[in-house]
Image (spheres, helix red, strand yellow):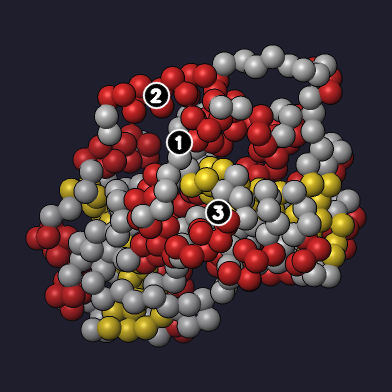
Amino acid sequence: MSAESDLMKQLARESSLLPQEAMVEVGRRKRSLFIGIPKELSFQEHRVPLTPQAVAVLVGRGHEVVIERGAGEAVHYQDSDFSEAGAMVVDSADQVYKADLILKVAPPSHREIEMLRPKQILFSALQLNVQPKDTLRRMMEKKITAVAWDFIKDREGIYPIIRAMGEIAGNTAILIASEQLSSEKGGPGLMLGGISGVAPTEVVVIGAGTVGEFATRAALGLGASVKVFDTSIYRLRRLQNDLGQRLYTSVVQPNEIKSALKRADVAIGALRPEHGRTPMVVTEEMVREMKAGSVIVDVSIDRGGTFETSEVTTHTDPVYKKYGVIHYCVPNIASRVPRTASLALSNIFGPLLLSMGEGGGFEEIIKKDLGVRHGVYLYNGALTSQILSEAFKLPYKDLDILLAAF
């Protein structure tokens, strides 16, 4: 990118952050939001973005919420829970899509994109690896403004929803491994952890990001012996500091991983990719030499997987054996505990929507909040994500320049 282009973007960003002359009184800047929550159509997506408690707070602040009947069934929220909170419960998705702002968990399907209205605002996951080019084009044609919640940042520059889902996935991965080690699930009949006089189970965690950190915390809490590998010495050092205790850590080296896996009862794949696919650092040969009955939980499977032997499975048929090793390779592990995940999502979406209403609406918040702005990938039909532009060879416009023009 040229120096002139970089300067133009910098000037646009500074301009968009300058205070604008208010044409109305301060007391009238609040804006009532009309929020629609459809029932999720994606396979095995059970989460809901707002709990009834969050809906009650929003409605109490003067916002309107419409939700499709049955949207909360998977997390044991009844329609009456939402209606008593002040939401309007409707029978069809078409009625939900009359709202100004659509809030959902999974990326929109073709059918859902057809229901979107021109100039509507959509909050959902983006998931670059499954985003079809034609769906983007259709959204661009409808001049949709779309925000990827997995790209929203907080004041500290952290992706709060990604971190929350990572914490859940890390903890849940260890619970899954513990379950699979039991004889009732076809495992060797081991308890994950340790007791007096019995050697602790050995856990290898590959990845020292959020998922790896919380998998390590959970395993240590149960009394297991844990070894952690990562491609970044910085992440390993940060993990040691955050845990406040010494444990075995190593940068990813084939011989070290091979040796650790030979002794492991559980291996967690938690590497995150810098770009594109997750690094596949465990070969088929390494898996072949693991103990019979040991367990692999590959949390990284949604981006390709850390283990060469990993194949995508589902919540209804989650495991298979290869070389005597139990493999659990279900994408979206957080949806296995949808109530917890929904509470975590609601804890972030609720305050964000309240802030949006208090600040004068969506247009105002993206001018003031760089973290929310970071999640915008379509603005009135213009593609503002350079990553998507390069991936799908679609025209790109800088969001800072677009906002500076208004």
Pointer 3: what residue? 140
Instruction: Say whether marks 2 and 1 touch (CB < 8 Å).
Output: yes
Tell me residue 131's x, y (percent): 46, 62
What residue appears at the point 62 percent right and 15 percent down from the top-left corner? 19
Q: Can see residue 168? A: no
In three-dimensional space, the C-alpha distance between marks 2 and 1, rounded to whole angstroms, equals 10 Å
Give the total of numbered labels.
3
What residue appears at the point 40 percent right and 85 percent down from the top-left corner? 186
Q: Disc 3 marks which amino acid?
A: Met
What is the secondary structure assignment of the residue under circle 3?
helix
Pointer 2: what residue? 8
Q: Can see residue 301? A: yes
Tell me residue 205's x, y (percent): 30, 57
Q: Is residue 101 above or below residue 48?
A: above
In the image: residue 214, left or right of residue 267? right
Dividing the picture into quadrants, the one containing residue 259 is: bottom left
Tell me residue 106's x, y (percent): 57, 61
Q: Disc 1 marks which amino acid?
A: Asp
In three-dimensional space, the C-alpha distance between marks 3 and 2, rounded to whole angstroms, equals 24 Å
Q: Earlier in the sequence, mark 3 or mark 2?
A: 2
